[in-house]
Amino acid sequence: MIHVAILGFGVVGSGVAEVIAMNEKQLERHLGIPIQVKKILDVRDFPDSPFASLFTKDADDIFEDSEITVVAETIGGATIAYELTKRALSKGKSVVTSNKELVAKHGVELMQLASKNHCIYLFEASVGGGIPIIRPLHRCLAANRISKVAGIVNGTTNYILTQMTESGEDFNSALAAAQMKGYAEKNPSADIDGTDARRKISILASIVLNGAYVDSDLIYSEGIAQVTQQDISYARYMDGKIKLLAIFLHPEDGQNSAIVAPHIVSTDEPLSVANGVFNAISVRGNALGDAMFYGQGAGKLATASAVVGDILDAALHKDRAAHITTWFYADEPVLAPHKKSKVKALLRVSVDTKDSEINVAVRGGFSDRIDGVVPDEAAYLIGVDGTLTEEMLDKAIRMIPGFISRIRIY
Amino acid sequence: MIHVAILGFGVVGSGVAEVIAMNEKQLERHLGIPIQVKKILDVRDFPDSPFASLFTKDADDIFEDSEITVVAETIGGATIAYELTKRALSKGKSVVTSNKELVAKHGVELMQLASKNHCIYLFEASVGGGIPIIRPLHRCLAANRISKVAGIVNGTTNYILTQMTESGEDFNSALAAAQMKGYAEKNPSADIDGTDARRKISILASIVLNGAYVDSDLIYSEGIAQVTQQDISYARYMDGKIKLLAIFLHPEDGQNSAIVAPHIVSTDEPLSVANGVFNAISVRGNALGDAMFYGQGAGKLATASAVVGDILDAALHKDRAAHITTWFYADEPVLAPHKKSKVKALLRVSVDTKDSEINVAVRGGFSDRIDGVVPDEAAYLIGVDGTLTEEMLDKAIRMIPGFISRIRIY
């Protein structure tokens, strides 16, 4: 019998208990022996839960129980979860988690601690919810040199952008609708401002770099609060949709870069299939070419199924610490400064803007003027073709008096 | 040092040698020790190959070499490849392969042989080329009960259907174009008639059934040679595309079924993003919901990268036989008879067909008449809504004098 403990009985934690109960036979077939949740830690009481008898408020009940070999941390955040994860790993108990904040912030320390204590720290559910992406990236694509990971990794913002696109609502109404449906939290800022997506792409980037830690705080990000119906119209004109993309580039020649920002994504691009709360992550390998992983990026059971997948793995491989390459702090910076990245974008300028003003602002780097996209608007569009850096584009924009807005193009 | 041998230096085999050479450092980082191709078996001579010094025509050079622990079988077919795989496994050497014919035909015996000899038989590259699908299905989704796998798993037919859709060519010209580009073989029948797709879905089905072997010969299949421009027009009218789908259904209640046939796939359906030689495989789990895996289903380096991924896994886990659940022959039939499956379809009937003839043919199960889809054609369409079985639909069709053609709907 494999004995598991769950730390935190919120949405994901209760989902983990449910998935284990619901798919008991399937799990036993996979493991060769039965698996059971033995204890659940939560400060709250759940007298009506089918798992009521398993609750404890004392973490020692779990950490001092030598039968418990795998712990699912589904508390979230980087405070209590951090302390409890360290304690579990120090006791040689493998920890699996959906907690992207903790992995993005303290992944190096926690993986090194796991390695030292001959147990493992797994976090498949931290990116893409139920979509298998961490393990495929690390294991199945190990034969490739990965040069790009780009994804729609935040379901809340994708739901809002999809609503804005399909119903014509503005950002605030779409956000309110998302909150009503439970797709956005009361305080949605970590989703809306790109923080959540930044954490996720930093995790994927650290895996691509064979464990060299990419600090999410160093990734440039823009949220979706500024996206307007005009942007959506322009995207539509270009046969595209506005998506919040998290991108990590690891070119063979040149420096690594990462960004989280709204982008126009062409409908020809496979990533564009991810609508509503769905996520999609595209990976480019030097042998594989392009591959994409698509599915529910959030949701109780979907995320829980990824946590349980990790529990199985931890149970089967307790003795093997080298499961995911242990992360480390690299000596050199792993990301180039954002301002040095090349950028493709669409600028919106007032109709009063003269071609000469555009030409003075920058020589080259701009493609043709595009008129009349939105009939009632006194503006036209200028394409920026990807030869300018972010810094050069910022400078150019400051020199164009009629500048209204910009949106990046994937 | 991990020493590898390659059996068969064709497209995939030479790709395996190239990927190992090209990504040497990446592979060493992953394994912790260097990896090298030590010998290549082929009856042909390759004096100008960069690997010229590694060739042998004598399989014993490989099987008697105790340093070689992993063998990549990239011969294809189920004759010589079968014999050599058995010999390698009998010697305790793990075998990895892209050979779907061999896995679909002799997978049970080969996996049992591997298990007996404490080595492993892996075949990630046998389905979906470079797309990680076997391992995600087996490992990452282990926490789910999978109820459906549906995919575009044959690049040749998808290329032909995409050509027919985008350029208006008929089947024969599109096939000729695919042959010119190297996307179809001179004798393309195994692709065109659905045999290849049948083998692949049988492999995925056997994994979903936790190793209960699904014989590909028992799967009903229709190829794409009968697909016409009319079918494509009707699909377009329904906002869809014609795709050769391989489907395995494993409902919670009811019997398993499998089919390979052209289907109308809605453009809202994520699978529809797979155009040209790309593949896409959709999986439904009871916790995960729907997920999809997309990428290059064929191609030298893409397929080779999946083979090399398996080589790494075999090298790291030589001692663990239970990597993929060993297949077995189930006591009961694992598939229900095709004629008992429910079917959604679109029937094309001549304009002379009377509503009463349709009504006599079958009571219920038909949705409304759809007129005027193709202006110049003296035909109309009848939707079949999924309540009829294949057998009932066949019977109904025989009773409709003006019946012209049918196409299934996904």
Image (cartoon, coloured by chain):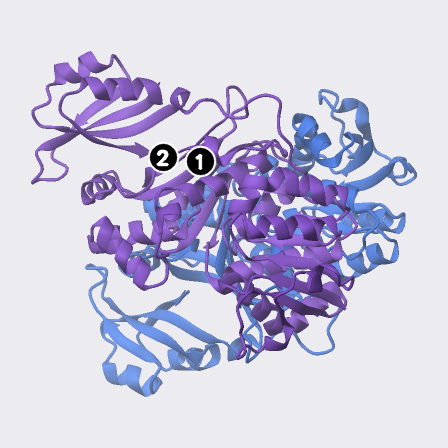
Chain colours: A purple, B blue
Residue B105 bears which disc, if any? none
The crowding category of the residue bearing disc 1, from other C-alpha atoms within 10 Å (few below 14, some 14 to 19, many at least 20), is many
Sort mark 2 into few (<14), some (14-19) or many (20+) by Cα contacts within 10 Å: some
Specify which label sits upstream in the sequence, 1 or 2: 1
- Discs 1 and 2 share one subunit: yes
- Whether residue B234 sits left or right of residue A67 in the image: it is left
Nearest the viewer among B329 and B354 is B329
Q: Amino acid at mark 1?
A: Ile
| Residue pointed to by mark 2 | A410
Contact, mark 1 vs mark 2 (Cβ under 8 Å): yes
Q: Is residue A164 visible?
A: yes
**Can residue B123 be seen at all in this image of the molecule?**
no
Q: Nearer the viewer, residue A27 or B124?
A: A27
Subunit that carries the residue with mark 2: A
The residue that mark 1 highlights is: A247
Secondary structure category for the residue under label 2: loop
Question: Where is residue B44, by image quadrant?
Answer: top right
Q: Note whether A6 is above or below B14 in the view shown.
A: below
Q: Secondary structure at mark 1?
A: strand
Say which of marks 1 and 2 sits in front: 1
Residue A212 in the image: above or below residue B306: above
Measured in 3D between alpha carbons, the distance from the residue under mark 1 to the one under mark 2, in whole angstroms, is: 9 Å
Residue B51 percent across, percent down from the top left: 75, 24
Q: Quadrant of the N terminus of chain B?
A: top right
In this rendering, position of residue B169 left or right of residue B115: left
Q: With respect to residue B173, does A359 lie above or below? A: above
Location of the C terminus of chain B (image quadrant):
bottom left
Residue B229 rendering spot, x and y as whole percentages = 33, 54
Q: Position of residue B115 (x, y in %)?
A: 83, 57
At 82% across and 47% down in the image, what residue appears? B318
User: Looking at the image, which residue is at 36% across and 75% down?
Assistant: B385
